[in-house]
Every structure is written in structure tokens, then in C-alpha cells.
Image: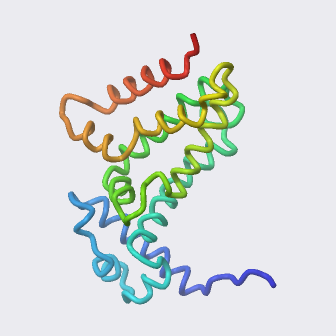
Amino acid sequence: MPERKPRKDAARNREAVLAAADALFARSESPEDITMADVATAAGVGKGTLFRAFGDRAGLLRALYEARLEPVREAIETGPPPLGPATPPHQRVLALLDAALCFKLDNRRLALALEESGSTSPYQAEHYDRWHGLLQGVLEQIPGLAADSDFTAHALLAAIRADLVEHLAGREDVPREKLRAQLAAFTTRAITTP
């Protein structure tokens, strides 16, 4: 049986909800303060529409996060170096972590809200599995790291957890470029085999 296409009004409502949620989270100092009712009102839809489309607040956060992440994902999957698949492994690991850090810096409140939402571990989230699998696959291509690629990928991703990024970015003595340089130095040490 062929997959049903969403109705035009449902697709339009989904876009309106994502745009409204995007604007609300961008302006909010505290992501926890944004409710489903706030998003529904800003999007001009009923709360029932919101819950049917996204299930719950965590589902809405995931959808918004994925929509914002799409250009990065395209660059990783099919783009040119340094993110694309033709990049040498050492350089690609550095570029992937830098892209993830920059994404989290640019989307601090949303990334933090997503990692803090729900009762499940952030390590069980679909986006975490994707990043881990990608990093592990690239690390396996580096001589001497294949055996520890699973742990190394987890350890490198821990360095860019949203709560840590929020803590470091909130300090005035740690500007964005310094964070990026520190991550690159840490990553280089972690993936350089003796």
C-alpha cells in the first residue's frame, strides 16, 4: 500500500508550528517556559493539532531540532570536504565535532531543551545515535583507533553535550572561537595514536 501524503493543510500547519516554535525558542531565555499552548497560539492552531502532529513537547523539540540540523546533515552525507565523506578521517572527525559544536552554540536553548526533555537518557535519543554512529565509523578508519572507536566516539560527544556547551558559552571569558580551538586541540589529542 503506498504511503499517504499529508493533507496540504496538515503540512501547512506543521510548517507554521515549526516556525512559531523556532521563533519562541530563539527569543526565550528559559526553554522550559515555552509550553505547547504558547506554540499553538503563536502558530494559530489548536493544541489538538499540535499534539496530533508531534505527540508531545519532546516530539516538537525533536522535529524542530531535525529541521534546523538538515543543512548540516546534507553536508555530512553528500557534501564536499571537510564534512563530506571524501574527507580524510582525522580531518573529518575534527570537522564533524566542530560542526556539532557550532550547531549547538547557534541553537543553545533548543539543544539544551531537547537534551533535558523527557525522562529518557540523552544517550538514547535518535540524534545522539546518528552522531555516535557517524563518529564511530570515521574513527574506525584511523589506524590504532578501531578497537576503541565506540568509547572514543562517546567521549568526544560528551565534550559537546548541550549542558556543557551552555555552561561554557555562558561564561564571558570563553568566546566561541576559543571553545572551537579548545575542542579541536582536545580532539586531536584524543585521536592521535602514539
Q: Quadrant of the C terminus?
A: top right
Q: Residue at x 33, y 76 (%)?
A: 39
Residue sticking out furthest to the top: 194
Q: Residue at x 43, y 23 (%)?
A: 186
Residue sticking out furthest to the front: 147
Q: Residue at x 62, y 49 (%)?
A: 74
Q: Is residue 143 left or right of residue 135?
A: right
Q: Quadrant of the N terminus?
A: bottom right
Identify whether 102 is placed above or below 116. above
Q: Position of residue 6 (x, y in %)?
A: 63, 83
Q: Quadrant of residue 173?
A: top left
Decide which of 67, 44 is in the foreground and name it: 67
Q: Quadrant of residue 178?
A: top left
Q: Position of residue 81 (x, y in %)?
A: 64, 31
Q: Position of residue 139 (x, y in %)?
A: 63, 30
Q: Is residue 49 left or right of residue 105?
A: right
Q: Residue at x 42, y 62 (%)?
A: 120
Identify whether 172 is placed above or below 192. below
Q: Is residue 70 left or right of residue 87?
A: left
Identify whether 176 is placed above or below 122. above
Decide which of 133, 181 is in the foreground and name it: 133
